[in-house]
Image (spheres, grey):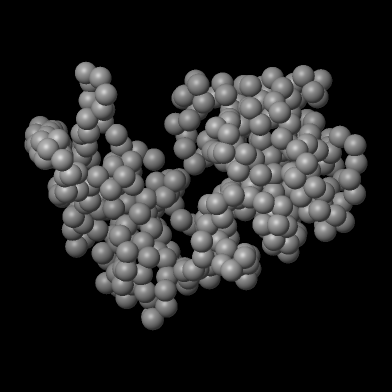
Amino acid sequence: MSSSELLRTLVGSQAGPVDVFFSPPSPGWRGGPTYLARREVNRIRSVMRRKLEPVVWAASPGLRPRYPSLRQAMLGGDIRIDLPESAPIRIVQRTTGFAPTDKIRVGSGGGIRQMGRWHDRPVLTRLGTVDTPGDPLRHFQALERLALEQMPEAFASGEVDGVRWTIESFIDGRPLKQVTPLMASKVTAFLAGMPPGTGPADVVGPAEPLSEDTAIVVKAIVQGIEDLPSVSAHGDLWSGNLLFRDGALVGVIDWDSWRERAVPGTDLLHLWAEDIRRADGLSYGDLVGRAFWEDRNVSQSLGEYLSTLGISWKRGLQPVLGASWWLTAVTGALARNPLLSTDPGWMARNVHQAIDTFDGHFK
């Protein structure tokens, strides 16, 4: 998600110049000059370029300054944007009666979201430019079609100036900080209650195959799951998308990557994988190399889930499900952020390293 796409979502296509305000300077004698320098550099560049997209300057170690993206600056609280009345979110507020109660936040896909009230209900509104990773349409479709108890309720949606907006119920809960066997069992119960798939499992997922190098992996998955049913899946299930209150799972959020015909077990494996990866600083390739699905807690959790679906455990099933999880995870990451495919380091650690491991196992 580029800064220009984010601004398109924020201010619309017909808006004029955007006023950008930097946050108050940090305490200390260095804070004032840094604040003034940021503001002046942005003013000069905006006059010279005469574009909507502001360039946000921040000091960094070394001789060269860095220019972080608009999204990073907003997430870090460095700047705010004074939105014109023609901005899509302003139009949504006027036409639907949505009253904001919190500041605008930027999601991982580049869409924006804001908490508020709508017809005296606590709600969350999402906005994203149509047909970009920030477009909330896919998420809203999941809320409408699945409509499970722990999911937000879909209220309203529409489109204004090329920006899609949605309104859903707000679930009061705290994100899960760390996956434990007890918490995983609660998630397992939720996953087991999701609707069955609508046909044969979609092995590759919503994105196109990464390359011809994945042929051996895809073939092994297809052969290994030919007797398995497909399931509905969240597609990006990690601890930050799970809300708990008083030890109970009360919310499963952010359904942008949901799938109607997934390989069973991929959601649960992704939950454990993200927990291990973030805690130990590992890549997807590292997780494949250590065959994390054979870890005691992960294996027991996966076995419990498959048992609830009536799937018998058989030799060789774990690495096949692990390969399916990996393929779903990397295609999902690339779909949400296509620029990752241009990062040789990311591709080497997360894609090629894993392919080499699987090739050695499945050949």
> From where the camera sits, is residue 100 visible?
yes
* Residue 122 image offset from top left, x and y in percent: 42, 74
* Residue 243 image offset from top left, x and y in percent: 55, 61
The single residue placed furthest to the front in the displayed view is 28
Residue located 78% across and 36% down the image: 294
> From where the camera sits, is residue 205 visible?
no
Residue located 58% across and 31% down the image: 282
Q: Quadrant of residue 100?
A: bottom left
Q: Is residue 306 left or right of residue 332?
A: right
Residue located 67% across and 57% down the image: 183
Observer-nearest of 302 and 83: 302
Q: Is residue 153 left or right of residue 109?
A: right
- Image quarter where the N terminus lies is top left
* Residue 139 image offset from top left, x and y in percent: 52, 57
Observer-nearest of 281 and 109: 281
Q: Is residue 135 left or right of residue 193?
A: left
The single residue placed furthest to the bottom in the displayed view is 120
How many marks can you see? 0
Residue located 49% across and 20% down the image: 344
Q: Is residue 328 left or right of residue 127?
A: right
- Whether residue 67 is situated above or below residue 78 in the rendered picture: above
* Residue 289 image offset from top left, x and y in percent: 70, 26
- Whether residue 330 is situated above or below residue 96 in the rendered picture: above
- Image quarter where the C terminus lies is top right
- Whether residue 122 is situated above or below residue 28 in the rendered picture: below
Q: Quadrant of residue 41?
A: top left
Q: Quadrant of residue 94?
A: bottom left
- Whether residue 222 is situated above or below residue 113 in the rendered picture: above
